[in-house]
Amino acid sequence: MAGVACVGIMWAVLSLLAALAAASGFLLPYWLQSSHPHQPVYLGTFRRCNYPRQAADGEVLVVTECGRYTHFTDIPSLYWQLTTITVGTGSALALLVALTGVVATCVRGVLTHATARLAAILQVCAGALVCGGVAVYPLGWGDREVQQVCGETAAPFEPGTCRVWWGLYLTGVAGVVNTLCAVLTCCAPHKPRYHSPPDFNSE
C-alpha cells in the first residue's frame, strides 16, 4: 500500500473492525436479556426489545417490538444515560480514526508521524470512553424498569434473573482493542529511507 507500512495496514484493519464492533454494540439493544423462554426482553443503553410498559390502569404490558426511548430523559437510569454519552462518543471517535486509517492505506502523506500520534491519542480516548461506559452500565441494574424485567433481586452489578448478553461483551472487547490499536500507530507511517551519497573520490 502507498500510504502506510505493513504494520500500518494491520492497524487500519484492526481499527476498522474494532470501531464497527463498538458502534454495533452501542446501537443494538442486546446488553441484557431476560430469562423468559418464549418472549425474552432485551435491554441496551438507549434501545430495548419486547420491553414492559405501564398502561393507564397500572397494569404492566409487554410491547413486542424494538425501539429507542422517545427522549434522552426517558432512559430510566442516570448511569445508562452516562453510558449512552460515553459509548456513543467513543464509538464516533473510533470510527473517525478508523476511516482515516483506511484512507491512509491508499493515499500517501495522510498518516505522518504527527497524525499518527494524534490518532493514538484519539484511540486511547475512544477506548477509555467505551470501556468506561461498559463499566458504568451495571450500576443501573437497580432501576425499577430493570427490576420489572429481571425481578426484585436486580441491583447494581447483580442482574437478578436476567443475564448479561453478547452486546455488552462485544462493546467491551471493542473498547479494549481500540486502546491496544493505539500502540500500533507508532509503526504505521512509512519510515523515510536514506541513501548514502555516492563517493566520487573512490577509484
Image (spheres, rainbow, N blue to C red):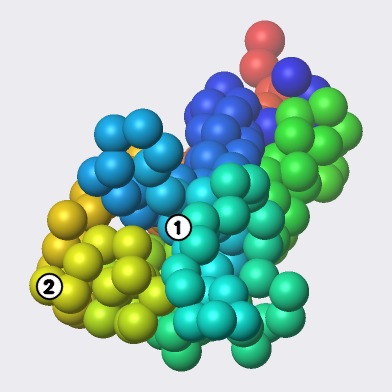
Closest to the observer: 85 or 115?
85
Q: Quadrant of residue 159?
A: bottom left
Secondary structure at badge 2 equals: loop
Bin the neighbour count of mark 1 within 10 Å (Cα to Cα): few under 14, some 14-19, many 20 and up: many
Distance (Cα) linking label 1 and label 2: 17 Å
- The mark nearer the N terminus, 1 or 2, is 1
**Vertical comparison of 87 with 50: above or below:** below
Left or right side of 149 for 119: right
Q: Which residue is mark 2?
A: 153
Taking the spot 63% from the left edge, 49% from the top edge, the residue there is 66
Q: Residues within 10 Å of mark 2 (few under 14, many from 20)?
A: few
Q: Position of residue 144 (x, y in %)?
A: 35, 82
Instruction: Locate residue 131: give its quadrant.
Output: bottom left
In the visual, does 180 lie left or right of 46? Answer: left
Q: Which residue is mark 1?
A: 43
Amino acid found under the numbered disc labelled 2 = Thr
